[in-house]
Amino acid sequence: MADTQLPPRIGIDRPGSFSRSVFHERHPVLIANLIADNTYPSHIRDRLEALLAETLEGTVPPEVPPGPNRPFWEAEIARCVGTPWNDLPFLWAESYFYRRILDAVDHFAPARVFYGADPFAPQKQAQLDGAELRTDLEAYAALTERDSTSQDRAERRQALLRAALWGNQADLGFRTTTAIAGQSDIVVDDSPAIWDLIDGPGSGPVIVVADNAGRELTADLALIDAILETAPVELHLKPHPYFVSDATGRDLLATLDALAADPNKPVQALAQRLRDAIRGDRLRLRAHGFYVLPTTYRHLPPDLAADFRAARLVILKGDLNYRRLVGDREWDAATPFGEVVDYFPGDVAALRTAKSDLAVGIDPVRLTELDNASPEWRVSGTHAMMQVLH
Ligand SMILES: O=P(O)(O)OC[C@H]1O[C@](O)(CO)[C@@H](O)[C@@H]1O
Protein backbone atom coordinates (compact mmCIF):
# COMPACT_ATOMS: atom_id res chain seq x y z
CA MET A 1 0.00 0.00 0.00
CA ALA A 2 1.44 3.39 -1.00
CA ASP A 3 2.15 6.07 1.65
CA THR A 4 -0.53 8.30 0.09
CA GLN A 5 -3.24 5.68 0.70
CA LEU A 6 -2.59 5.37 4.42
CA PRO A 7 -5.36 6.42 6.85
CA PRO A 8 -4.87 9.40 9.21
CA ARG A 9 -2.41 9.11 12.08
CA ILE A 10 -3.74 8.45 15.59
CA GLY A 11 -3.45 11.63 17.66
CA ILE A 12 -3.80 12.45 21.34
CA ASP A 13 -6.24 15.32 20.88
CA ARG A 14 -9.55 13.45 21.07
CA PRO A 15 -11.17 13.54 24.54
CA GLY A 16 -12.09 10.06 25.71
CA SER A 17 -9.62 8.35 23.35
CA PHE A 18 -7.16 5.71 24.56
CA SER A 19 -4.16 7.68 23.29
CA ARG A 20 -5.20 10.78 25.21
CA SER A 21 -5.68 8.72 28.36
CA VAL A 22 -2.10 7.47 28.05
CA PHE A 23 -0.83 11.04 28.30
CA HIS A 24 -3.41 12.47 30.67
CA GLU A 25 -4.04 9.51 33.00
CA ARG A 26 -1.13 7.05 32.76
CA HIS A 27 1.79 9.41 32.47
CA PRO A 28 1.08 11.23 35.76
CA VAL A 29 1.27 7.83 37.47
CA LEU A 30 4.37 6.89 35.47
CA ILE A 31 6.19 10.05 36.59
CA ALA A 32 5.06 9.56 40.21
CA ASN A 33 6.41 6.00 40.08
CA LEU A 34 9.76 7.15 38.68
CA ILE A 35 10.08 9.65 41.50
CA ALA A 36 9.06 7.09 44.14
CA ASP A 37 11.27 4.29 42.78
CA ASN A 38 14.50 6.22 42.28
CA THR A 39 16.64 8.21 44.69
CA TYR A 40 16.60 11.37 42.63
CA PRO A 41 17.69 14.74 44.04
CA SER A 42 15.23 17.64 43.85
CA HIS A 43 16.49 19.08 40.56
CA ILE A 44 15.78 15.80 38.73
CA ARG A 45 12.39 15.44 40.42
CA ASP A 46 11.58 19.02 39.40
CA ARG A 47 12.57 18.31 35.80
CA LEU A 48 10.33 15.24 35.67
CA GLU A 49 7.38 17.17 37.05
CA ALA A 50 8.01 20.05 34.64
CA LEU A 51 8.12 17.59 31.75
CA LEU A 52 4.79 16.11 32.80
CA ALA A 53 3.19 19.57 33.04
CA GLU A 54 4.58 20.48 29.62
CA THR A 55 3.07 17.34 28.04
CA LEU A 56 -0.35 18.10 29.54
CA GLU A 57 -0.61 21.77 28.62
CA GLY A 58 2.55 22.96 26.87
CA THR A 59 4.25 22.99 23.49
CA VAL A 60 7.37 21.40 22.02
CA PRO A 61 10.41 23.50 23.03
CA PRO A 62 13.29 24.19 20.59
CA GLU A 63 16.02 22.34 22.54
CA VAL A 64 17.11 18.98 21.15
CA PRO A 65 17.41 16.46 23.98
CA PRO A 66 20.81 14.71 24.05
CA GLY A 67 21.38 11.12 22.99
CA PRO A 68 21.90 9.06 19.85
CA ASN A 69 20.11 9.74 16.54
CA ARG A 70 20.72 13.47 17.07
CA PRO A 71 20.38 14.57 13.41
CA PHE A 72 17.02 12.82 13.25
CA TRP A 73 15.73 14.60 16.35
CA GLU A 74 17.15 17.96 15.25
CA ALA A 75 15.10 17.76 12.06
CA GLU A 76 11.99 16.49 13.84
CA ILE A 77 12.07 19.15 16.52
CA ALA A 78 12.69 21.91 13.98
CA ARG A 79 9.48 20.72 12.30
CA CYS A 80 7.43 20.45 15.52
CA VAL A 81 8.75 23.30 17.69
CA GLY A 82 5.89 25.33 19.17
CA THR A 83 3.31 22.60 18.46
CA PRO A 84 1.03 21.87 21.43
CA TRP A 85 1.69 18.35 22.72
CA ASN A 86 -2.01 17.62 22.35
CA ASP A 87 -1.70 18.14 18.56
CA LEU A 88 1.19 15.71 18.08
CA PRO A 89 0.79 12.23 16.57
CA PHE A 90 0.55 9.65 19.36
CA LEU A 91 3.56 7.54 18.37
CA TRP A 92 5.83 10.55 17.83
CA ALA A 93 4.74 12.13 21.10
CA GLU A 94 5.38 8.95 23.12
CA SER A 95 8.81 8.38 21.60
CA TYR A 96 9.80 12.00 22.25
CA PHE A 97 8.38 11.80 25.79
CA TYR A 98 10.64 8.85 26.67
CA ARG A 99 13.69 10.60 25.22
CA ARG A 100 12.85 13.66 27.32
CA ILE A 101 12.59 11.44 30.43
CA LEU A 102 16.12 10.17 29.78
CA ASP A 103 17.27 13.77 29.44
CA ALA A 104 15.51 14.77 32.68
CA VAL A 105 17.26 12.01 34.64
CA ASP A 106 20.73 12.76 33.17
CA HIS A 107 20.86 9.39 31.39
CA PHE A 108 22.88 10.92 28.53
CA ALA A 109 24.92 13.36 30.66
CA PRO A 110 28.52 12.11 30.98
CA ALA A 111 30.22 12.93 34.28
CA ARG A 112 26.90 13.24 36.10
CA VAL A 113 25.99 10.74 38.81
CA PHE A 114 22.97 9.23 37.02
CA TYR A 115 24.73 8.95 33.67
CA GLY A 116 23.71 5.66 32.04
CA ALA A 117 21.39 4.67 34.89
CA ASP A 118 18.11 3.11 33.75
CA PRO A 119 15.22 5.03 35.39
CA PHE A 120 13.03 1.98 34.94
CA ALA A 121 15.54 -0.46 36.48
CA PRO A 122 13.68 -0.73 39.83
CA GLN A 123 10.47 -1.81 38.05
CA LYS A 124 12.35 -4.24 35.83
CA GLN A 125 14.22 -5.72 38.80
CA ALA A 126 10.95 -6.13 40.72
CA GLN A 127 9.63 -8.30 37.89
CA LEU A 128 12.81 -10.39 37.83
CA ASP A 129 12.50 -10.90 41.60
CA GLY A 130 8.74 -11.35 41.56
CA ALA A 131 6.59 -14.34 42.46
CA GLU A 132 4.93 -14.34 39.02
CA LEU A 133 8.20 -14.98 37.24
CA ARG A 134 8.95 -17.82 39.70
CA THR A 135 5.59 -19.36 38.76
CA ASP A 136 6.40 -18.93 35.07
CA LEU A 137 9.71 -20.72 35.53
CA GLU A 138 8.13 -23.58 37.51
CA ALA A 139 5.73 -24.06 34.61
CA TYR A 140 8.62 -23.92 32.13
CA ALA A 141 10.45 -26.62 34.08
CA ALA A 142 7.36 -28.86 34.13
CA LEU A 143 6.79 -28.30 30.43
CA THR A 144 10.31 -29.26 29.36
CA GLU A 145 10.66 -32.25 31.69
CA ARG A 146 7.94 -34.27 29.95
CA ASP A 147 9.35 -33.93 26.44
CA SER A 148 9.77 -37.39 24.93
CA THR A 149 7.53 -37.98 21.90
CA SER A 150 7.33 -35.84 18.77
CA GLN A 151 3.80 -34.85 19.76
CA ASP A 152 5.13 -33.63 23.13
CA ARG A 153 7.76 -31.64 21.26
CA ALA A 154 5.18 -30.01 18.98
CA GLU A 155 3.00 -29.15 22.00
CA ARG A 156 5.99 -27.80 23.90
CA ARG A 157 6.99 -25.58 20.98
CA GLN A 158 3.44 -24.30 20.62
CA ALA A 159 3.22 -23.65 24.37
CA LEU A 160 6.47 -21.69 24.21
CA LEU A 161 5.20 -19.63 21.28
CA ARG A 162 2.03 -18.83 23.20
CA ALA A 163 3.98 -18.00 26.33
CA ALA A 164 6.03 -15.51 24.31
CA LEU A 165 2.80 -14.12 22.87
CA TRP A 166 1.06 -13.74 26.22
CA GLY A 167 4.31 -12.67 27.84
CA ASN A 168 3.64 -9.40 26.03
CA GLN A 169 0.71 -8.98 28.36
CA ALA A 170 3.18 -9.76 31.18
CA ASP A 171 0.30 -11.48 32.86
CA LEU A 172 -0.21 -15.01 31.72
CA GLY A 173 3.27 -16.03 30.66
CA PHE A 174 4.15 -19.67 30.94
CA ARG A 175 0.85 -20.60 32.54
CA THR A 176 -0.57 -20.35 29.03
CA THR A 177 -0.33 -23.84 27.60
CA THR A 178 -2.03 -25.39 24.66
CA ALA A 179 -4.60 -26.92 26.98
CA ILE A 180 -5.59 -23.85 28.96
CA ALA A 181 -4.83 -21.09 26.50
CA GLY A 182 -8.38 -19.95 25.88
CA GLN A 183 -8.20 -19.92 22.08
CA SER A 184 -11.06 -17.44 21.86
CA ASP A 185 -8.69 -14.73 23.12
CA ILE A 186 -6.30 -15.25 20.20
CA VAL A 187 -8.04 -13.21 17.57
CA VAL A 188 -5.74 -14.24 14.71
CA ASP A 189 -3.56 -17.35 14.97
CA ASP A 190 -1.09 -17.84 12.12
CA SER A 191 1.16 -20.02 14.25
CA PRO A 192 1.34 -22.95 11.75
CA ALA A 193 2.87 -20.57 9.19
CA ILE A 194 5.30 -19.29 11.82
CA TRP A 195 6.63 -22.80 12.50
CA ASP A 196 6.75 -23.60 8.76
CA LEU A 197 8.98 -20.57 8.22
CA ILE A 198 11.17 -21.35 11.25
CA ASP A 199 11.62 -24.97 10.14
CA GLY A 200 11.90 -24.07 6.46
CA PRO A 201 14.94 -24.27 4.18
CA GLY A 202 17.71 -21.70 4.05
CA SER A 203 20.56 -20.71 6.28
CA GLY A 204 19.31 -17.27 7.33
CA PRO A 205 18.59 -16.62 11.00
CA VAL A 206 15.27 -16.07 12.67
CA ILE A 207 15.37 -12.47 13.91
CA VAL A 208 13.46 -11.83 17.12
CA VAL A 209 12.88 -8.14 17.79
CA ALA A 210 12.34 -8.04 21.55
CA ASP A 211 9.87 -5.89 23.41
CA ASN A 212 9.72 -5.90 27.22
CA ALA A 213 12.25 -7.11 29.77
CA GLY A 214 11.18 -9.30 32.71
CA ARG A 215 8.54 -11.93 32.13
CA GLU A 216 8.22 -11.23 28.41
CA LEU A 217 11.94 -11.45 27.68
CA THR A 218 12.13 -14.63 29.76
CA ALA A 219 9.38 -16.19 27.67
CA ASP A 220 11.07 -14.94 24.50
CA LEU A 221 14.34 -16.57 25.55
CA ALA A 222 12.60 -19.90 26.12
CA LEU A 223 11.08 -19.62 22.64
CA ILE A 224 14.46 -18.66 21.17
CA ASP A 225 15.99 -21.75 22.79
CA ALA A 226 13.37 -23.88 21.00
CA ILE A 227 13.99 -22.09 17.68
CA LEU A 228 17.73 -22.68 18.05
CA GLU A 229 17.04 -26.41 17.65
CA THR A 230 16.42 -25.74 13.95
CA ALA A 231 17.73 -22.25 13.09
CA PRO A 232 20.26 -19.65 14.20
CA VAL A 233 18.70 -16.66 15.93
CA GLU A 234 19.46 -12.96 16.12
CA LEU A 235 17.91 -11.15 19.10
CA HIS A 236 17.42 -7.41 18.59
CA LEU A 237 17.29 -5.20 21.67
CA LYS A 238 16.87 -1.50 22.43
CA PRO A 239 20.15 0.43 22.66
CA HIS A 240 18.92 2.33 25.73
CA PRO A 241 15.86 2.41 28.03
CA TYR A 242 12.58 3.28 26.33
CA PHE A 243 8.80 2.84 26.97
CA VAL A 244 9.22 1.76 30.65
CA SER A 245 10.16 -1.89 30.45
CA ASP A 246 11.70 -2.19 26.98
CA ALA A 247 14.55 -4.70 26.99
CA THR A 248 18.14 -3.52 26.61
CA GLY A 249 21.36 -5.53 26.50
CA ARG A 250 21.79 -5.05 30.25
CA ASP A 251 18.31 -6.47 30.81
CA LEU A 252 19.24 -9.51 28.79
CA LEU A 253 22.34 -10.12 30.93
CA ALA A 254 20.32 -9.66 34.14
CA THR A 255 17.72 -12.11 32.84
CA LEU A 256 20.35 -14.74 32.01
CA ASP A 257 21.75 -14.34 35.53
CA ALA A 258 18.26 -14.77 37.01
CA LEU A 259 17.67 -17.93 34.95
CA ALA A 260 21.06 -19.35 35.95
CA ALA A 261 20.29 -18.72 39.64
CA ASP A 262 16.83 -20.32 39.50
CA PRO A 263 16.47 -23.45 41.65
CA ASN A 264 14.84 -25.44 38.81
CA LYS A 265 17.42 -27.52 36.95
CA PRO A 266 15.69 -27.17 33.52
CA VAL A 267 15.79 -23.38 33.95
CA GLN A 268 19.51 -23.45 34.81
CA ALA A 269 20.02 -25.66 31.74
CA LEU A 270 18.13 -23.12 29.63
CA ALA A 271 20.47 -20.35 30.81
CA GLN A 272 23.48 -22.53 30.03
CA ARG A 273 22.26 -23.38 26.50
CA LEU A 274 21.57 -19.72 25.77
CA ARG A 275 25.00 -18.66 27.04
CA ASP A 276 26.65 -21.39 24.97
CA ALA A 277 24.68 -20.26 21.92
CA ILE A 278 25.84 -16.66 22.44
CA ARG A 279 29.45 -17.77 22.89
CA GLY A 280 29.17 -19.93 19.76
CA ASP A 281 27.54 -17.13 17.73
CA ARG A 282 24.47 -19.24 17.01
CA LEU A 283 22.51 -16.71 19.05
CA ARG A 284 23.65 -13.25 17.98
CA LEU A 285 22.73 -10.10 19.87
CA ARG A 286 22.12 -6.77 18.25
CA ALA A 287 21.03 -3.31 19.39
CA HIS A 288 20.01 -0.69 16.84
CA GLY A 289 19.16 3.01 17.10
CA PHE A 290 16.15 2.51 14.83
CA TYR A 291 14.31 0.75 17.66
CA VAL A 292 14.07 3.93 19.72
CA LEU A 293 12.66 6.16 16.98
CA PRO A 294 9.04 7.09 16.24
CA THR A 295 9.36 6.16 12.55
CA THR A 296 7.66 3.09 11.18
CA TYR A 297 9.12 -0.05 9.62
CA ARG A 298 8.21 1.48 6.24
CA HIS A 299 11.26 3.67 6.70
CA LEU A 300 13.87 1.09 7.68
CA PRO A 301 17.56 2.03 7.59
CA PRO A 302 19.33 0.11 4.79
CA ASP A 303 21.38 -2.12 7.12
CA LEU A 304 18.32 -3.39 9.00
CA ALA A 305 16.37 -3.81 5.76
CA ALA A 306 19.20 -5.99 4.42
CA ASP A 307 19.21 -8.08 7.62
CA PHE A 308 15.45 -8.55 7.47
CA ARG A 309 15.64 -9.53 3.81
CA ALA A 310 18.26 -12.20 4.59
CA ALA A 311 16.40 -13.63 7.59
CA ARG A 312 14.20 -16.70 7.26
CA LEU A 313 11.66 -14.94 9.48
CA VAL A 314 11.49 -11.70 11.47
CA ILE A 315 9.40 -11.98 14.64
CA LEU A 316 8.28 -8.59 15.95
CA LYS A 317 7.21 -8.73 19.58
CA GLY A 318 4.68 -6.51 21.25
CA ASP A 319 2.30 -3.68 20.71
CA LEU A 320 4.78 -0.91 19.98
CA ASN A 321 6.45 -2.98 17.24
CA TYR A 322 2.98 -3.70 15.85
CA ARG A 323 2.19 0.01 15.75
CA ARG A 324 5.45 0.65 13.91
CA LEU A 325 4.88 -2.24 11.51
CA VAL A 326 1.31 -1.40 10.60
CA GLY A 327 1.58 2.37 11.07
CA ASP A 328 -0.06 4.07 14.06
CA ARG A 329 -3.12 5.00 12.06
CA GLU A 330 -6.89 4.82 12.11
CA TRP A 331 -7.12 1.52 10.26
CA ASP A 332 -10.30 -0.30 9.47
CA ALA A 333 -9.45 -3.47 11.44
CA ALA A 334 -10.77 -5.65 8.59
CA THR A 335 -8.03 -4.40 6.21
CA PRO A 336 -5.97 -7.49 5.29
CA PHE A 337 -2.67 -7.70 7.19
CA GLY A 338 -0.79 -8.65 4.01
CA GLU A 339 -2.09 -5.57 2.22
CA VAL A 340 -0.89 -3.27 5.01
CA VAL A 341 2.60 -4.72 5.47
CA ASP A 342 3.34 -5.72 1.87
CA TYR A 343 6.26 -3.27 1.92
CA PHE A 344 8.22 -5.36 4.47
CA PRO A 345 11.53 -6.62 3.01
CA GLY A 346 11.15 -10.24 4.20
CA ASP A 347 8.85 -12.70 5.92
CA VAL A 348 7.50 -11.18 9.11
CA ALA A 349 5.39 -12.33 12.05
CA ALA A 350 3.81 -9.96 14.56
CA LEU A 351 3.12 -11.33 18.05
CA ARG A 352 1.23 -8.86 20.22
CA THR A 353 -1.44 -8.51 22.81
CA ALA A 354 -3.70 -5.65 21.75
CA LYS A 355 -2.89 -2.61 23.90
CA SER A 356 -3.65 0.31 21.60
CA ASP A 357 -6.45 1.38 19.27
CA LEU A 358 -5.23 -0.13 16.06
CA ALA A 359 -5.60 -3.59 14.59
CA VAL A 360 -5.67 -4.99 11.08
CA GLY A 361 -6.35 -8.35 9.50
CA ILE A 362 -9.37 -9.23 11.62
CA ASP A 363 -12.08 -11.31 9.98
CA PRO A 364 -15.11 -8.97 9.55
CA VAL A 365 -17.55 -11.35 11.26
CA ARG A 366 -15.19 -11.83 14.21
CA LEU A 367 -14.65 -8.09 14.32
CA THR A 368 -18.36 -7.41 14.73
CA GLU A 369 -18.55 -10.05 17.49
CA LEU A 370 -15.57 -8.55 19.29
CA ASP A 371 -16.83 -4.99 19.05
CA ASN A 372 -20.24 -6.04 20.36
CA ALA A 373 -18.98 -8.33 23.11
CA SER A 374 -16.23 -6.14 24.54
CA PRO A 375 -15.63 -2.70 23.05
CA GLU A 376 -12.39 -2.46 25.07
CA TRP A 377 -10.83 -5.49 23.38
CA ARG A 378 -8.35 -3.39 21.37
CA VAL A 379 -6.69 -1.80 24.39
CA SER A 380 -7.24 -4.15 27.32
CA GLY A 381 -4.38 -6.57 26.58
CA THR A 382 -6.82 -9.46 26.89
CA HIS A 383 -6.80 -10.23 23.16
CA ALA A 384 -3.80 -11.38 21.21
CA MET A 385 -2.78 -11.95 17.62
CA MET A 386 -0.09 -13.84 15.73
CA GLN A 387 -0.09 -12.54 12.17
CA VAL A 388 2.27 -13.52 9.38
CA LEU A 389 3.23 -12.10 6.00
CA HIS A 390 5.13 -14.46 3.70
O1 LIG B 1 5.10 -3.11 25.55
P1 LIG B 1 4.30 -3.03 24.31
O2 LIG B 1 3.54 -4.27 24.03
O3 LIG B 1 5.11 -2.59 23.14
O4 LIG B 1 3.20 -1.97 24.55
C1 LIG B 1 3.48 -0.67 24.81
C2 LIG B 1 2.18 0.01 24.75
O5 LIG B 1 2.05 0.81 25.87
C3 LIG B 1 1.57 2.05 25.49
O6 LIG B 1 2.67 2.91 25.51
C4 LIG B 1 0.50 2.57 26.35
O7 LIG B 1 0.96 2.86 27.60
C5 LIG B 1 1.07 1.85 24.12
O8 LIG B 1 1.05 3.01 23.50
C6 LIG B 1 2.03 0.88 23.57
O9 LIG B 1 1.57 0.39 22.43
Image: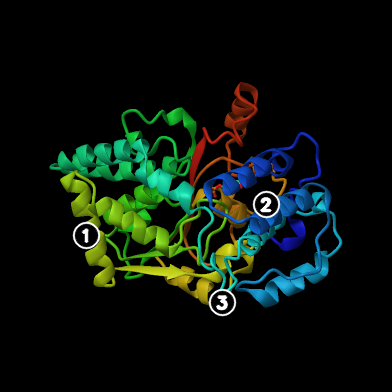
In the rendered view, tell whether residue 239 sits above or below residue 358. Answer: below
Indicate which label's residue lies in the foreground, 1 or 2. Answer: 1
In which quarter of the view is residue 283 placed? bottom left
Picture quarter with the N terminus: bottom right
Would residue 243 be found to the left or right of residue 315 on screen?
A: right
Q: In the rendered image, which residue does mark 1 sit on? A: 273
Indicate which label's residue lies in the foreground, 3 or 1. Answer: 1
Answer with mark 3 or mark 1, whichever residue precedes in sequence.
1
The kind of secondary structure element at disc 3 is helix
Q: Amino acid at mark 2?
A: Asp
Q: Which mark is residue 302?
A: 3
Q: Residues within 10 Å of mark 2 (few under 14, many from 20)?
A: many
Q: Amino acid at mark 1?
A: Arg
| Percent coordinates x, y for residue 262 in the rendering | 23, 47
Along the line of sight, which residue is nearer the eye, 144 or 71? Answer: 71
Residue at the left extreme, as displayed = 148
Would residue 87 be found to the left or right of residue 161 on screen?
A: right
Q: Amino acid at mark 3?
A: Pro
Answer with mark 3 or mark 2, whichever residue precedes in sequence.
3
**Tag 3 and tag 1, C-beta contact below 8 Å:** no
Q: Is residue 359 visible?
A: no
Q: Residue at x 21, y 59 (%)?
A: 273
| Percent coordinates x, y for residue 2 in the rendering | 71, 62
In the rendered view, tell whether residue 7 sits above or below residue 103. Answer: above
Alpha-carbon span between mark 3 and mark 1: 32 Å
Q: Residues within 10 Å of mark 3 (few under 14, many from 20)?
A: few
The kind of secondary structure element at disc 2 is loop
Q: In the rendered image, which residue does mark 2 sit on? A: 328
Q: Residue at x 59, y 56 (%)?
A: 325
